[in-house]
Image (tube, grey):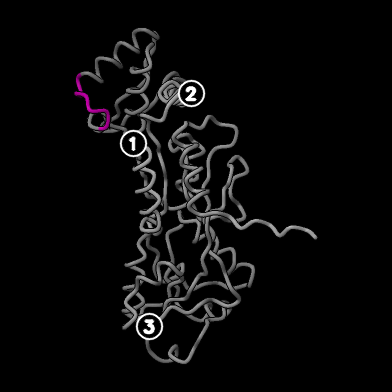
Amino acid sequence: MDIRTLRYFVEVVRQQSFTRAAQTLFVTQPTISKMLKHLEEELDCTLLIREGRQLRLTDSGQAVYSRGLGILDQFRQLEAELEDIGSLKKGRLRLGIPPMVGTQMADLIRDFRRKYPGIELQIAEFGGLTVQQAVLSGELDLALTALTADTQDALTVLPVFSHPLCAVVPRAAPWLERDTVPFIELGDWPILIYNEDFALYRQLITAFQAEGINPQIAVRSGQWDFLAAMVEAGIGIAILPEPICRRLDKTRLLSLPVAPLMMWQLGLIWRRDSYLSHGAQAWITACRRHWPQPRPPVAR
């Protein structure tokens, strides 16, 4: 059994389709079919059964798939170690970021690319909980995500920056005379909130539960501009980080800090005790320089 055949098999199972797997792997469907047939012959067992348009794993197939995931993860780490030994002239960095912070990363990405032009950045934009799981599974090397109390212990965390959360409301009565929005009052209004795979969603739901509030969730979305449009349409109140609020149409919308102050804290995460490529280490160093942490006061 070679690693390429194992990769083909795992991808077919993931995609539940020979055609989609072939497209993902940039090979022909007959190539995949031939390789998997050879794999079954080599192992002397049936791995997949077609049931209409569905593919079902046999018991043997389930065992090969489960073990194969671990083997491919170990092989990826081996490839990373061999690829960048001794230099940063080439390599790949798989980085996850929440969609709402892309613009805040532009300067850092520009500086990193100038310093390490041979490092290919593969950026995945998903909600914080999704990228956290992707880091744990080895699909991503690093990820920037909103930090919550339930961030996995298996992850190393480097806090990088934080911003206040604001209630986004129409520029109209009764908000024009307000400077803040008490968090407890949010239970009186329909709430527009991020999808469940965003760490900010988890942070807000936890805060509502702590106050005994049953929020009236009107809309969930993964797009901040859509949530802002829903506020303009009078559907409810959105709760967004202050940097996002700077980009809103100030002639139509107000952003008022939530009181007491609630912070949206972001951090860089990676899998604890796992190999970090030189590219990943360079990115961590770049983040420390770009967002230096305040030093603790010196005792006198």
Q: Foreground residue, 136 or 109?
A: 109
Q: Foreground residue, 93 or 24?
A: 93
**Compared to 102, does 214 lie above or below?**
below
- The secondary element bearing badge 2 is classed as helix
| Kind of residue indicated by mark 2 | Gln
Q: Between disc 1 and disc 2, whose residue precedes?
A: 2
- The secondary element bearing badge 3 is classed as strand
Residue 232 in the magenta stretch? The answer is: no
The residue to which callout 3 is attached is 170
- Tell me the quadrant of the picture where the N terminus can be found: top left
> Residue 291: image x %, image y %?
51, 54
Q: Between disc 3 and disc 1, whose residue precedes?
A: 1
Query: What residue sits 34% from the left and 73% below the top?
Result: 248
Q: Give how far apart the Cα atoms at labels 1 and 2 are.
A: 21 Å
Q: Quadrant of residue 204?
A: bottom right
Mark 2 near mark 3, Cβ–Cβ under 8 Å? no
- Farthest residue, direction right: 300
Q: Between disc 2 and disc 3, whose residue precedes?
A: 2
Q: Foreground residue, 111 or 165?
A: 111
The residue to which callout 1 is attached is 120
Mark 1 neighbour class, 10 Å CA radius: few under 14, some 14 to 19, many 20 or more: some
Left or right of 40 in this view: 136: right
